[in-house]
């Protein structure tokens, strides 16, 4: 019997009268179920198709007794859980800090992962001026243990989704509304880096030119523009 497999379910195809009919039915069922997954919330933002052990092959290349596998990275689940965890761990006085956790995709602010492409960075940060003090434990908190919010969230998210995504903690700068990845700066020869795509490189150049004139080339390293970050990547 031929098989169609997804990340959480599989379908066996009964052998038809001919190998050709079996193969055609396998392809039909595979495409139907794949389309169902793509249109079911939460919708996967990407997938990998493996046909008889070959990554990226078309469904039609499957043998009559072969296997079609679709792998769906569920990063949107990880991101949603991370944001909810940060919200729950946030100290509450005015509520501004709790509401200020912000998603960035490949350096640009985003409301969801619809524009995300495999390999791009996903970052959650809090751009409020005192977010760094809360994270460093240098702010007097009304409730004991309500500081270091991002580091606490890191442990919770890793504990639940560590087998689905790489989650790490660091500090990143936000300059001109863009989130800066200083770790990439050395390889690009820039004083900061926004992403691989052309628009991001252009934005990086404009920001570097305008802001460096005012603050110097280390503008992104100034303490007042560096904020705690959860960095989420595919495994």
Image (tube, rainbow, N blue to C red):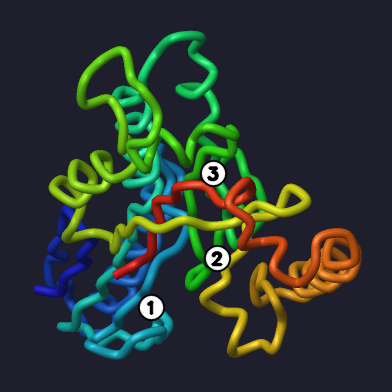
Foreground pick, 228 / 235: 228
Mark positioned earlier in the residue sequence (1 or 3): 1
Q: In terms of image quadrants, where is residue 146? A: top left
The local crowd at label 2, few if under 14, some if 14 to 19, many if 20 or more residues have their Cα within 10 Å, is few
Q: Give the label, 1 or 3, closer to the camera.
A: 3
Residue that mark 3 sits on = 103
Vertical order, 86 against 99 (above or below): below
The mark nearer the N terminus, 1 or 2, is 1
User: At 67% from the left edge and 68% from the top edge, which residue is drawn?
Assistant: 194
The alpha-carbon separation of the residues under discs 1 and 3 comes to 35 Å
Question: Is 22 above or below relative to 12?
Answer: below
Q: Are marks 1 and 2 in contact (CB under 8 Å)?
A: no
Residue bearing the label numbered 1? 59
Between marks 1 and 2, how big is the CA–CA gap?
Answer: 22 Å
Circle on res. 117: 2
Image quarter where the C terminus lies is bottom left
**Image height of 133 relative to 233, above or below:** above
Furthest residue in direction left, as rendered = 1
Discs 1, 3 touching: Cβ within 8 Å:
no
Residue located 62% across and 46% down the image: 224
In this rendering, position of residue 173 left or right of residue 67: right
Assign the N terminus to one quadrant of the image: bottom left
Judge whether 191 appears above or below 138 on screen. Answer: below
- As helix, strand or loop, the secondary structure at mark 1 comes to helix
Q: Position of residue 119 (x, y in %)?
A: 48, 73
């Amino acid at each position: 019997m031929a098989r169609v497999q997804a990340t959480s379910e599989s379908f066996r195809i009964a052998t038809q009268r001919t190998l050709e009919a079996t193969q055609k039915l396998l392809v039909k069922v595979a495409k139907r179920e794949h389309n169902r997954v793509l249109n079911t919330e939460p919708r996967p933002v990407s997938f990998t198709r493996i046909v008889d052990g070959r990554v990226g092959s078309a469904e039609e290349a499957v043998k009559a007794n072969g296997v079609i596998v679709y792998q769906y990275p569920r990063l949107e689940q990880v991101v949603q859980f991370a944001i909810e965890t940060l919200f729950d761990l946030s100290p509450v006085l005015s509520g501004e800090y709790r509401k200020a956790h912000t998603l960035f995709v490949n350096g640009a602010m985003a409301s969801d992962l619809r524009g995300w492409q495999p390999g791009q960075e996903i970052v959650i940060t809090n751009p409020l001026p005192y977010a760094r003090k809360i994270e460093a434990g240098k702010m007097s908190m009304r409730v004991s243990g309500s500081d270091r919010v991002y580091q606490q969230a890191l442990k919770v998210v890793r504990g639940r989704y560590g087998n689905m995504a790489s989650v790490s903690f660091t500090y990143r700068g936000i300059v001109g509304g863009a989130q800066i990845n200083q770790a990439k700066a050395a390889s690009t020869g820039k004083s900061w880096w926004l992403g691989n795509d052309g628009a991001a490189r252009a934005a990086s150049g404009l920001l570097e030119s305008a802001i460096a004139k005012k603050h110097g080339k280390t503008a992104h390293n100034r303490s007042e523009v560096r904020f705690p970050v959860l960095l989420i990547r595919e495994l």
